Amino acid sequence: MHEELDTVVVEFDEAEGVGRLTLNRPDSLNAMNMRMREDIETGLGMLAERDEEGDGVAVRVVVIEGTGEKAFCAGADITGFSGVSPAAFDAHGMRDSVIEFPAPVVAKIDGYCLGGGLELALACDIRIASESSRLGFPEVDLGLLPGAGGVQYVSRLAGPAVAKELAMTGEHMGGERAAEESIVNHVHGDEEFDEEVEAFVGTLAAKPPLAIRAIKDSGNVSVESGLREGRKYDRRVFSTLLETDDHEEGARAFAEDDYDPEFRGK
């Protein structure tokens, strides 16, 4: 599958079960305009349809990245919002489409990841950055705050003090510090970056997809609900997973020392 929307390239590798959304506005450092937000939602919808077409889980992992080596996404394209209503700046729908996508979504961050671009990355389940990446919230210099929950999410990952500093100063944070502050999961040198990301994605794609999706949901419940509700969720879904073919395959492989089980998402 290879579809080119106006601002996003959508790809799907059926053999690996890996979908890709590539932000494709290199002349503007992949800055996000209204069309890109819509294309991200459309692209995720196209990938979600793959699950409905086959027997078992089709999409194991989705990777979001930017065209070129200069930017993942340099933030909102301010010129593209000129003269529109404040509602046009609302990116919560796009963020929700990433958060609620059933399979894990990995942000592959290389270069600038600023403002709305960083908020897009924060909506992803896993963030992997190159050493030369630059992350930040420049909205303060426009008299604004990050409008799609940026301070909220960095506060949960790195603490309120780090979130406030990042948003109040508008300064950029390098990949190494972003990893130290748990804003990204992993940081890799520029030369081995692509290889390391692909290795991680391959590892994730090989895991039992129903369990992976349940773990994603469990993590989201932990953020949005209390411990009691989270434990109820885990107990209920654990019982459901015990009845799956994937659990049976995993138990068989463990008993037989088979290090290459085949999980089908059933």
Image (tube, rainbow, N blue to C red):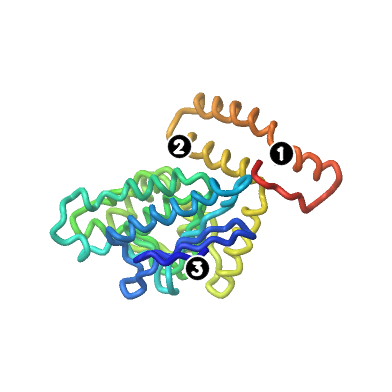
Residue at the image position 16 percent from the left and 61 percent from the top? 82
To which residue does mark 2 refer? Answer: 223
Quadrant position of the C terminus in the picture: top right
x%, y% of residue 97?
Answer: 40, 47
Q: Secondary structure at mark 1?
A: helix
Circle 1 or circle 2, nearest the eye: 1
Q: Residue 173 sits in which quadrant?
A: bottom left
x%, y% of residue 17?
Answer: 60, 56
Q: Is residue 199 left or right of residue 154?
A: right
To which residue does mark 3 refer? Answer: 131
Q: CA distance from mark 3 to mark 1?
A: 40 Å
**Tag 1: amino acid:** Asp
Q: Disc 1 or 2, which lies upstream in sequence?
A: 2
Q: Residue 240 sits in which quadrant?
A: top right
Circle 3 or circle 2, nearest the eye: 2
Residue at the image position 35 percent from the left and 68 percent from the top? 30
Q: Secondary structure at mark 2?
A: helix
Residue furthest left as drawn: 83
